[in-house]
Amino acid sequence: VFITAHELTHQYQFENIGEWDRNNWFTEGMADVIAASVVGMHQGNRKSVEEDYRQSWTSQLRKAAPAIPVLSQLDKRQD
């Protein structure tokens, strides 16, 4: 169900937006979130599926945190 919903989201995007970069993080993220919501509705437990998805991405971001600069670091110029 997840993969079908994910790919149908891409079909909807293509029909309404036209050609786009298929490796774009936004289109992939949108398809994943919608697919997670569909799976949750199908299982009758929408909130926990979305929460699991959010926790998974939060965990991945925390692992990458040392490589992600904070806003104050972005403002500093390195000449």
Image: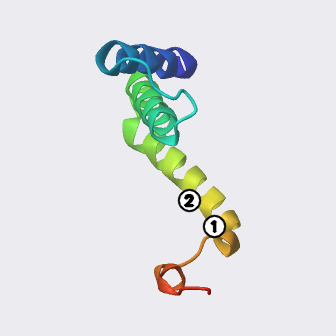
Q: Which one is in front, 51 or 23?
A: 23
Q: Is residue 15 left or right of residue 51?
A: left
Question: Residue 19 falls in which quadrant of the image?
Answer: top left
Q: Which one is in front, 53 or 7?
A: 7
Residue drawn 64% across and 70% down?
A: 65
Kindly identify which residue carries mark 1: 62
Where is residue 73? Give x, y as percent. Answer: 54, 84
Q: Tag 1, which secondary structure?
A: helix
Please say which color scheme the image uses. rainbow
Q: Do the residues labelled 1 and 2 touch (CB within 8 Å)?
A: yes
Q: In the rendered view, would you say 4 is above or below 33?
A: above
Neighbours of disc 1 within 10 Å: few (<14), some (14-19), many (20+): few
Kindly identify which residue carries mark 2: 58
Q: In the rendered view, would you say 64 is above or below 76?
A: above
Q: Which amino acid does label 1 sit on?
A: Arg
Q: Which amino acid does label 2 sit on?
A: Thr
Question: Residue 30 falls in which quadrant of the image?
Answer: top left
Residue drawn 54% across and 26% down?
A: 22
Where is residue 61? Give x, y as percent. Answer: 61, 61
Q: In this view, does 62 lie to the left or right of 49?
A: right
Where is residue 10? Give x, y as percent. Answer: 45, 20
